[in-house]
Amino acid sequence: MGTPVTDRPKLSIIVPFFNEEESIRPLYAAIIAAIDPLNISYEMVFVDDGSKDTTVDIATGMARLDPRVRLVKFRRNYGQTPAMAAGIEHARGEILVTMDGDLQNDPADIGLFLEKMAEGYDIVVGWRHNRQDKLISRKIPSRIANRLIGKVTGVPIKDNGCSLKAYRGDLIKHIPLYSEMHRFIPAMASIAGPKIAEIKVRHHARQFGKSKYGLSRVYKVLLDLMVIKTVASFTSRPLLWFSLLSLPMLAAGSLTLGYAFYSMLTENAPLSLPVAGSGLILLTSALILVSGGAFGELIYRSGDMRESDFSRLTQKIKRSQRAVE
């Protein structure tokens, strides 16, 4: 059965499944064929994302026969990112590799990821340079999104959507994941200053079933991109950035309220409640923003005094890099 799993295996392979009853057996066999010759301890963390077919039954049978297979089951379908996050949480390996369960990613490429990680990299991202997907609905939107993500986040990855990635376990377990955030892990991790590499990987056409993704998730990606840009920009100086955001409302509120009082004094007219009320609302909104920035600054500084997780994570990364070098 290959190299047995130790207390902490060298490698964890995390695979989310959703209605992949035809793919799970050949993928399991392909993983074994690819990893057993490497002579390292490893485990497979299969995450069933609320499948309605026999996927979970097949995976349960595998887990009973092979101690290297660990199964995480969801009661309903939550999506790829929560499934990835659950797999990462339960994985015990020093290096974590994520991949899709539809046989489009090739387990034979995992050895290349391990070689790159051995050079001192903390994240290695797969690039599907010869992608076997539809041009209009998959390839073109992906290219546009990758360029946009690179410009906004400052992390120029050619293929953020490729699920085949490798991470150091101590790094990835400190990165929060939700919505469609699994594709932004390199950008989220960049706060801690990891070394990131990108390698070409094989990509196969889907053999069974239908793709679960399409143009409908574009808006989620755009919203998540806005969140990441906000977090990356505002994290270290929240008071400054929230104060800058409040300036337009502060100016508009001051002008509106000033105009209301000026009209009342110069024209001997009663105070215009709609105009004055609008000014007060704008000024109050500006004050709320500044207060939010002040609270954020307080929380951030308090976290600095306790040494934040990302600070400790950065130190671990630097120590591991020196050890490799």
Image: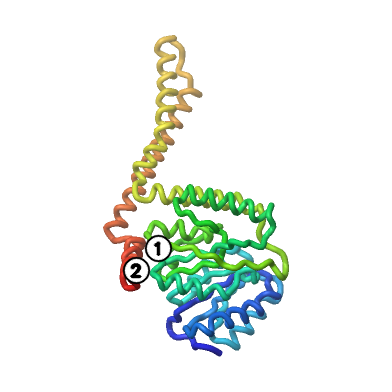
* Mark 2 / mark 1, whichever is N-terminal: 1
Residue 83, label in figure: none
- Between 252 and 24, the residue placed more toward the observer is 24
Q: Residue at x 32, y 61 (%)?
A: 311
Image position, residue 288 (x, y; %): 40, 39
Tell me what residue is drawn at x 41 percent, y 73 percent. 118
**Left or right: 73 as drawn, with respect to 255:** right
Quadrant showing the C terminus? bottom left
Return the residue at label 1: 195
Residue contact at pointers 2 and 1, CB within 8 angstroms: yes
Q: Is residue 220 shown above or below 212?
A: above
| Identity of the residue drawn at 49% across and 61% down | 177
For residue 267, which quarter of the picture?
A: top left
Q: Looking at numbered disc 2 in the image, what kind of residue is underneath it? A: Gln
Q: Which residue is mark 2?
A: 321
Q: Residues within 10 Å of mark 1 (few under 14, many from 20)?
A: some
Q: Is residue 58 above or below residue 120?
A: below
* Residue 261 vertical placement versus 119 (above, below): above
Residue 209 in picture, x, y percent from top left: 72, 68
How packed mark 2 is, by other alpha carbons closer than 10 Å (few <14, some 14-19, many 20 or more), is some
Identity of the residue furthest to the left in this view = 305
- Element type at mark 1: loop
> Which residue is nearer to you in this view: 120 or 314?
120
Residue 129 shown left or right of residue 191 in the figure: right
